[in-house]
Amino acid sequence: MVPDRRGNLTFVEGGNHVPFQIARAYWVYDVPGGARRGAHAYHHLEELIIAISGSFEVGVDDGCKRSRYTLNRGYVGLYVPQMTWRSLENFSTNAVCLCLASRRYSPDDYVRDYDEFVALVSASS
Ligand code: TYD
């Protein structure tokens, strides 16, 4: 973060602050109370998830261990490696979730079934 009385500034560089080149950015916003987004894993995609505004929770699960993080600072990003089940929940009013991704959008890279995810993790270990 670069604090400034005129307003703070934060930046991120692919391959420097995150261990991948940034191929895509997308953001999730106007999420109604109680809604959940992004409950899936990716075969190959890595990402950085940032609460640009407001707050939300990210549940992450590598097939062995589950963790939960509250993101509520625009200068903090959560790195999520490939083959991690992740879900976004408990969005505050006006929350904006920015995702910086290592790959362009590809539906084939998604693992949308949790049991399939667990089976894939088990098969690779
Ligand atoms: P998705 O990643 O499936 O979000 P969620 O798991 O929260 O439903 O994306 C929702 C829809 O948006 C899906 O139909 C695909 C589309 N989409 C794109 O076309 N490009 C993108 O970069 C993303 C992230 C989603």
Image: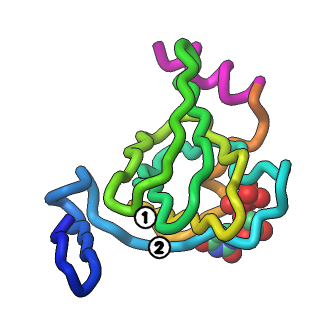
Going by the image, does 23 lie left or right of 8?
right
Going by the image, does 78 lie left or right of 60?
left
Q: Is residue 115 above or below residue 16?
A: above
Asked which colour scheme the image uses, the reply is: rainbow
| Residue 73 or residue 124, whichever sits in front | 73
Mark 1 closeness class: few <14, some 14–19, many ≥20 residues within 10 Å: many
Name the kind of residue labelled 2 in the image. Answer: Ala
Residue placed at 24% from the left, 65% from the top?
A: 14
Indicate the position of residue 111 as horizontal and vertical percent values: 68, 42
Going by the image, does 73 lie left or right of 119?
left
Indicate the position of residue 84 as horizontal and vertical percent values: 53, 34
Kindly identify which residue carries mark 1: 100
Circle on res. 27: none
Circle on res. 25: 2
**Magenta stretch?**
115-125
Q: Main secondary structure of the magenta part?
A: helix
Residue placed at 66% from the left, 42% from the top?
A: 87
Name the kind of residue labelled 1 in the image. Answer: Leu
Residue placed at 51% from the left, 35% from the top?
A: 69
Mark 2 closeness class: few <14, some 14–19, many ≥20 residues within 10 Å: some
Q: How far apart are labels 1 and 2 at the CA level?
A: 5 Å
Element on which disc 2 rests: strand
| Residue 25 or residue 36, whichever sits in front | 36
Residue placed at 57% from the left, 20% from the top?
A: 66
Element on which disc 1 rests: strand
